[in-house]
Image (cartoon, grey):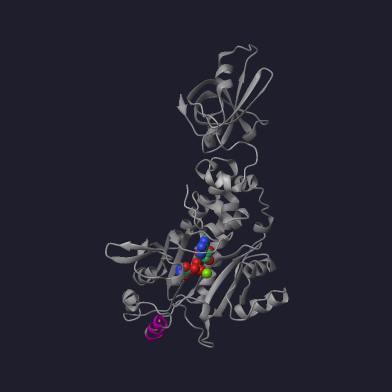
Amino acid sequence: MKWVYIEDISNYIGQDVEIRGWVYNKRSSGKVRFLLIRDGTGIIQGTIFSPDKDFPLFRVFDELTQESSVIVRGNVREDKRAPGGYELEIKDIEVIQIARNYPITPKEHSVAFLMEHRHLWLRSQKQHAILQVRAETIRAIRDFFDGRGFRLMDTPILTPSACEGTTTLFETTYFDQKAYLSQSGQLYNEATAAAFGKVYCFGPTFRAEKSKTRRHLIEFWMVEPEVAFATLQDIIELGEDLIMFILERVLERRKKDLEILERDTAPLERIAKPFPRITYDEAVKLLKEKGSQIVYGDDFGAPEETLLSEIFDRPVCVTHFPAKIKAFYMQPDPERPDLALGVDFLASEGYGEIIGGGQRIHDLDLLEQRIKEFNLPREAYEWYIDLRRYGTFPHSGFGLGLERTVAWLCKLPHIRETIPFPRLLYKIYP
Ligand code: 4AD
Ligand code: MG
């Protein structure tokens, strides 16, 4: 008998097939037994019917518990009343294992308990839906950049230097040297951009953030395009296009998952280009009008980002931050050198920053000066300075945080469910 996946079941109406999976739930009603089976691609209802109460398959059915692993064989029927629209008329159940006392029952559990059992929690319908949205988002991102002629460049995870400030570095040893887990692939992609014109990297990044918030992970995935000769404006348009591409793709292909998550998609469907662009100065004014205590010159924290992103019905781009609160590599505004040509995209519905980026310094002297001002060890940046020695070029790029984007798309209260095994402050189990 042919082994098929539940997501393909509509191709097998009237045929006998085999489904390999786990028991999701079961119930009986008179002469019928209902078995919900999941196989990772979906859930299907299987039925066993017999007027005989000693029917042998009933005995196998009675033994089955939640998450028992089984191979079920039967005939596929279209049935409008069945969840998913199809049903399996079960002819045979082969039990691989009866699962005893599966810890996650249909009752309510605390988040702490569920996080301790993350390896099992992944099997539940909502977690499954979130991770489907994640996988679709990853695919959309790759299709977007590959389709626009960007070259994928994998940047190193073990690095000798910091990209985003030294306070959140994860230190490790590299034989007889100190090394750090990558905070961003940006610096390396400034080199590959000179070799390939437009590039992107997409991989895990690490921040030893001592902040315990709903939007910080210690290990998260970031996609980072870098474009030679692009300005801040060019890169803002690229970010806009990327977000629109992801949105449209996820709304088109993961509608069912968003439904399972009870995500009201209307606010996402209304989003269109162009996104509003405001400067840091304007943002501070808006914040003060909304009653925020923000002091001019300070960086935005989560409360400010939330306030700002609630003002607009689509993502908003904040530009021209004070250079002092931004990374060493940011190009100053020629009109006002105290401001950096950087941009943060704040997602709508209060989600805050999902993209950070901007134009990079391409002047040799200025970069050397900044490295000094930021007290960075020059030896580790010699290769990076070289890029300003040999055919320097204006260039821009950004990083989009995958998990923050997924949290926004799914409208989740916390980022921890957007990655299969989240690394959180002091928490590395499971
Ligand atoms: O703003 P960030 O720190 O920018 C950079 O790392 C640049 N080097 C990127 C570049 O220009 N190539 O981080 C970029 C994005 C943020 O907007 C956010 O979405 C995400 O990465 N991010 C985090 N996501 C989850 N947990 C954290 N601790 C994050 N820190 C940043
Ligand atoms: Mg940022």
Q: Residue at x 72, y 76 (%)?
A: 289
Residue lying furthest left: 176
Q: Residue at x 63, y 11 (%)?
A: 52
Name above or below for residue 266 compared with residue 375: above
Whether residue 197 can be seen here:
no
Q: Is residue 344 magenta?
A: no
Residue lying furthest bottom: 335
Residue 393 in the image: x percent, y percent? 39, 79
Residue 345 in the image: x percent, y percent? 57, 68
Whether residue 165 can be seen here:
yes
Residue 146 in the image: x percent, y percent? 44, 59
Task: From the viewer's side, name the closer residue of 66 and 114.
Answer: 114
Q: Residue at x 47, y 49 (%)?
A: 429
Name above or below for residue 356 compared with residue 341: above
Residue 336 in the image: x percent, y percent? 54, 87
Residue lying furthest front: 426
Name above or below for residue 103 compared with residue 302: above
Name above or below for residue 291 compared with residue 92: below
* Span shown in magenta: 365-372
Q: Residue at x 30, y 62 (%)?
A: 174
> Exactly how many numbered labels are in the figure?
0
Q: What secondary structure prevails in the magenta region? A: helix
